[in-house]
Image (tube, rainbow, N blue to C red):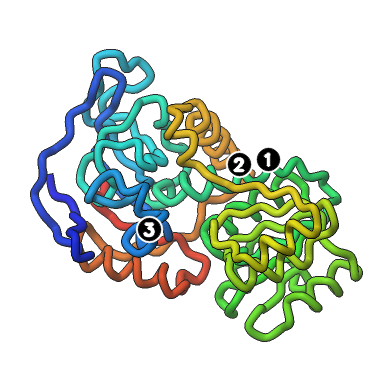
Amino acid sequence: MKAIVLHQKGEFKLEEVDTPQPKEQQVQVKIAAAGFNPIDYQMTENAMERKLLHSSILGREFSGIISAIGERVTDFKIGDPVFCGSGSMGSNGTYAEYICVPAAIVMHLPKNISFEESAGISSVGLTALQSINRMKANLTDSILVTGGAGGVGNMLLKLLLSKGYVNLIVTAGNENSIAALLDLGLKPRQIINYRKDQVYETALALNNNKYFDFAVDLVGNEIGLTAAKLLKINGTYVDVTNFSTPDSREVLFSRGATILNISNYAFGLEKQYDYYKKGLNELRILLENKSITPPMIEIVGNLEDETVLKALNILRENKTNGKKLIMQINPL
């Protein structure tokens, strides 16, 4: 099969590699489309994220068609359309024509969305669901979300709004991102342009000069520090980035905050596959019922090294404009 292979000097090359074959409890999928995530470029730059690099072929979510099944697989048949957040549980990453993954983490494709749309759901959807489930917030609790127009933020806000949460304040950094948030159903008074407004002062004013019950940080670093300062005593800080700083950790400690570190791959390391199946099934039902919509996508290109370089550069520079970046591999 063809795949984009990462070499030691950080170069990506389109090469012919062996096509993986499914083990007895795995399925082989002919990949239709793959989603890009920040962790993809972080694995090439960040020592901590590099520890998750299990294959020289990157990519962690996809959609496609079942092309072969292991002897003990009963839930799928050849030809079934599926989507999956493979993480580091696949035979290789998703920048490839084929992948083998445990059947226990695969989900049937929602009937009303495309392969390209579904390829961008798994990682952001599971992250957003885990955040909400672990927060256990009341519908009237005040929630600050930093970086709400990104992939995770977009899905998180869709889920929060669908579940009836109303007391939301969200940061964004440009007019395209703000427009995307308005399209989700947020009102202008719920959105802070962090490039024009003082986030701390503006957020307090919008929250009736009260500190927030929850802060969901999707950005980290300086904005994460600001989010920490906006949290009430014994509030809950949801860290999705792992980009906290010594200053933000000091503030959170002084406020007696509960810190929720959000991680999908932890369940894969422990082979708790039901986490993926349950989460993806919930997302499938919500999408089929039209309780939520799939993310807005941008198809960057086909299975070429130029596509990967372009997509990772857009992610690195935070210029997705609220869209999920997708690579078409075997258009179906």
The residue labelled by disc 2 is 130
Quadrant occupied by the N terminus: top left
Residue shown at the point (77%, 75%) measured from the top left: 200
Mark 2 or mark 3: whose residue is earlier in sequence: 3
The image position of residue 294, as x and y in percent, is: 51, 51
Classify residue 99 as left or right of residue 150. left
Q: Is the residue marked by circle 1 packed among few (<14), some (14-19), or many (20+) residues within 10 Å?
A: few
Residue type marked 1: Arg
The image position of residue 263, as x and y in percent, is: 53, 44
Real-space Cα separation, disc 1 to disc 3, in angstroms: 28 Å
Mark 2: secondary structure: helix
The residue labelled by disc 1 is 134
Residue shown at the point (52%, 66%) measured from the top left: 322
- Towards the viewer: 238 or 328: 238
Mark 1: secondary structure: helix
Decide: is 331 above or below 178: above
Are the two marked residues, 1 and 3, in contact with CB atoms closer than 8 angstroms?
A: no
Residue 116 makes an appearance in the image: yes
Residue shown at the point (37%, 51%) measured from the top left: 116
Real-space Cα separation, disc 2 to disc 1, in angstroms: 6 Å
Real-space Cα separation, disc 2 to disc 3, in angstroms: 25 Å
Residue shown at the point (39%, 39%) measured from the top left: 83
The residue labelled by disc 3 is 47
Are the two marked residues, 2 and 1, in contact with CB atoms closer than 8 angstroms?
A: yes
Residue 32 makes an appearance in the image: no
The image position of residue 252, as x and y in percent, is: 73, 59
